[in-house]
Amino acid sequence: MSFLDRIVGLLQRRDVKLIARIWVKGIGMPFDATSVYTSSIQGICSFFDHYLNHTGDIGVCIADSRNKFKNVNVSHSIFTQKFSPAVQAYPRIVELPTFGHSDNYAGLQLCDIVCSALLFPVACFAYCAGHVHNVYVQPAAANLRDRNGSQFKALQFRFRDPATAAGSWSLTPWATAAVP
């Protein structure tokens, strides 16, 4: 827990903003991993672009590499949106997503730790407890949620998108106790 507390403290001191996407597969429902991964990276790039617009900055996205085919597929989808003659997306992201291996990048290692030690267990517990009984749904994650919830809520980048009826584009297991 001390290690995780130090990670959260580092994120707070550096004013890191978190952007994440959580998918909960329906019980017995099909799951198209390529489509989900592609739309997730598109969503994260969209959130990141909003953040860069909010701060008046430019940036790049470095994602954990999967395999060449999957990386190319995602990059092509971002390229198509970014350079569309109709509507150019992601104007503040200056390059297509770059893919690296987390064993070579400290930033990706931190993302892995945050996701695997905090976000994933808390999300599994928050959205699946009472619905799914498997190794991923651990009651101990409620302690992580209680211990780190307010800090992670404060680290989220949230914005209001006037183009959507839903308004706020932030959903977090830190604030939601049951399946929405």
Image (cartoon, rainbow, N blue to C red):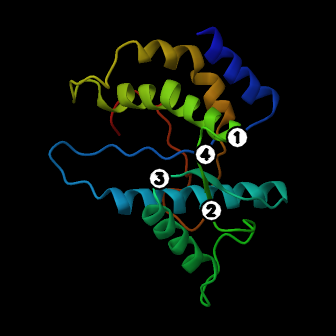
User: Can you tell which of label 2 and label 4 is closer to the viewer?
Assistant: 2
Q: Distance between the residues labelled 3 and 1?
A: 24 Å
The secondary structure type at the circle numbered 1 is loop
Question: Looking at numbered disc 1 in the image, what kind of residue is underneath it?
Answer: Lys
Q: Mark 1 points at which residue?
A: 17
Q: Are marks 2 and 4 in contact (CB under 8 Å)?
A: no
Residue at (64% x, 68% y) in the render: 96
Q: Are marks 4 and 1 in contact (CB under 8 Å)?
A: yes
Q: Mark 2 points at which residue?
A: 97
Q: Which residue lies furthest to the bottom in this view?
A: 85
Q: Name the residue under label 4.
A: 19
Estimate the x, y position of residue 45 in percent, counting from the top left.
61, 60
Q: Residue furthest left?
A: 28
User: Can you tell which of label 3 and label 1 is closer to the viewer?
Assistant: 3
Q: Distance between the residues labelled 1 and 2?
A: 18 Å
The secondary structure type at the circle numbered 3 is loop
Estimate the x, y position of residue 91 in percent, counting from the top left.
72, 72
Sequence-first tag of 3 and 1: 1
The secondary structure type at the circle numbered 4 is loop
Q: How far apart are marks 4 and 3 (CA)?
A: 19 Å
Task: Report if residue 174 is visible in the image.
Answer: no
Labelled disc at residue 66: 3
In the picture, measured across the screen, residue 43 lies left or right of residue 158, that is: left
| Viewer-proximal residue among 26 and 116 | 116
Judge whether 32 appears above or below 12 on screen.
below
